[in-house]
Amino acid sequence: MNINLLNTIKKRKILIVGDAMLDTYFFGEVKRISPEAPVPVFRKVGEKTVLGGAGNVAVNLVAAHQDVSILTAVGKDTAGERLLQLLEDNGIHTELAVSAERKTTVKTRFLADNNQQLIRMDVEDTREIAWTEIQQALAKLEACMQSYDLVVLSDYMKGLLTYDLSQTIIQMAKRHQVRVLVDVKDVRIEKYRGAFILKPNLAELHAATGMPVETETEIVAASQKLQKECLCDYVLTTCGAQGMILVSHETYWKTPAMKQEVFDVTGAGDTAIAYLSAALANELTMQEAVSISNCAAGLQVSKVGTSAIDLMDVSGAYVDMNHHFVGKLLSVEGAVRLRAMYPDQCIVFTNGCFDLLHVGHIRYLRQAAALGDLLVIGLNSDQSVRTLKGEGRPVNCEADRAELLCALPFVDYVIIFDEETPYELIKTVQPDILVKGGDYKPDEVVGRDIVEQRGGRLVLLDYVGGKSTTHIIEHITGGGQNDRDHPPKASGQHPHQI
């Protein structure tokens, strides 16, 4: 992927369905206590009103250069008129907005010195919207659903996203092969069944599953339960300072939080799902989309209050944060584009577990990189390593092993794969040079036939004796008195990579 997002993220049509609201901020100062009661006296000096809730998701998508429409319920009141005007002022299409007999949700925050929030006042109506009030909007949506690249359900539990409406939209989108992303709030998770991705935070994940979410293992287990019960493809949990954890059917992937001074977490979830949606609508891989989402959310928490994070800012921060890591890490799906991206360059491929990175790995990979223009590493997933090595391996999880490899300047791309051998991955990458250790015989090397059929070649590099993860583990545990220079090979793996 080109890590310059300005060249990668193009305008796509995205529909937001959810609870839009107004976020009003009163700015002022507190200098004294009221003589009428022991409370601070707030002297107002300014105010602003911006879009909140699903409206904040929409404005962040506009800031990400997307073509955005919204289906929301707006009260027949002054606040509703203001809400519609702000949506239109921000270039958000409101043809599907519903005028309903209800109060428009308004959250008013009082901010004193250093943007300290003193109190929040909410005006809202959380009664479920009547089906008769939304039928016309649904008829319009049925007629144009196929035109959208993605649908986002932004649930703030204000009465719009009932079970019936949520399921109607999810099933309608499925009929038109449009993916649905859900920002989860409701513990009645059955209404989200069939969505492509669910995005809870830790508290929401705990509430939805009733499971503990204190440790990474617990978060993954709870996410797997949510995924199974809702029949979704992915669960992406935002974990605050711990970053994000993406769980799929077979595995999970963790991305660390962007190092950033936190001023206000308001709107971070909205920004995260907005940029996740923009990336997926542009057909980026799931890991790329999560990394972009994580970066955008990190910028959001550095600001005070609800605000839109511009694509230019996200692009700059993404390059700074990920140039040596995420920009190099590809999913198997992303690997499909490698040969098209570099049609005239010599791609060198090797593979392994790379558990406990050591000098043997470094020398081997540096030599491999010198053979061509790009070095691509197939990295065995944790599941694949356990299949090859048994329980207790790997010592380092796949995310850590991938980050270490990505930090090497002579490594261009790392791709994690689940199979016992990299044969299918080699078919996908179509390398020009396949590299293995010199202790292999040519006919033992997996994928040699694929490379040679396209005019490429196999290169066997000299083996560095006595350098292996097994050697290191035995030495640490006291079992290394009779260390072997050549530990046994395991199904296509070089001894350096054991």
Image (spheres, rainbow, N blue to C red):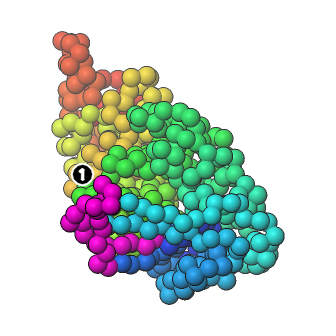
**At 34% from the left edge and 70% from the top edge, which residue is drawn?**
314
**At 66% from the left edge and 79% from the top edge, which residue is drawn?**
76
265 relative to 2, above or below: above
Residue 400 position, x and y percent, is 32, 41
Check if residue 295 falls in the magenta segment: no
**Secondary structure mainly formed by the magenta segment:** strand
Residue 39 position, x and y percent, is 31, 57
Q: Quadrant of residue 214?
A: top left
Report the front residue among 163 and 414.
163
Residue 88 position, x and y percent, is 55, 86
- Judge the density around disc 1: few (<14), some (14-19), many (≥20) Cα neighbours within 10 Å: some
Q: Work out which quarter of the rendered image holds the N terminus and state it.
A: bottom left
Check if residue 37 falls in the magenta segment: yes
Which residue range is magenta in the image? 23-46
With 17 as the anchor, is 399 left or right in this view? Answer: left
With 412 as the anchor, is 155 left or right in this view? Answer: right
Report the front residue among 269 and 409.
269
Disc 1 secondary structure class? loop
Q: Quadrant of residue 102?
A: bottom right
Report the front residue among 251 and 221.
221
Residue picked out by circle 1: 407
**At 18% from the left edge and 38% from the top edge, which residue is drawn?**
359
Q: Work out which quarter of the rendered image holds the C terminus and state it.
A: top left
Instruction: Say how many tags the image has.
Output: 1
Q: Amino acid at mark 1?
A: Ala
Residue 160 appears in the figure: yes
Residue 31 position, x and y percent, is 20, 66
**At 44% from the left edge and 50% from the top edge, which residue is drawn?**
238
Report the front residue among 189 and 130.
130
Residue 279 appears in the figure: no
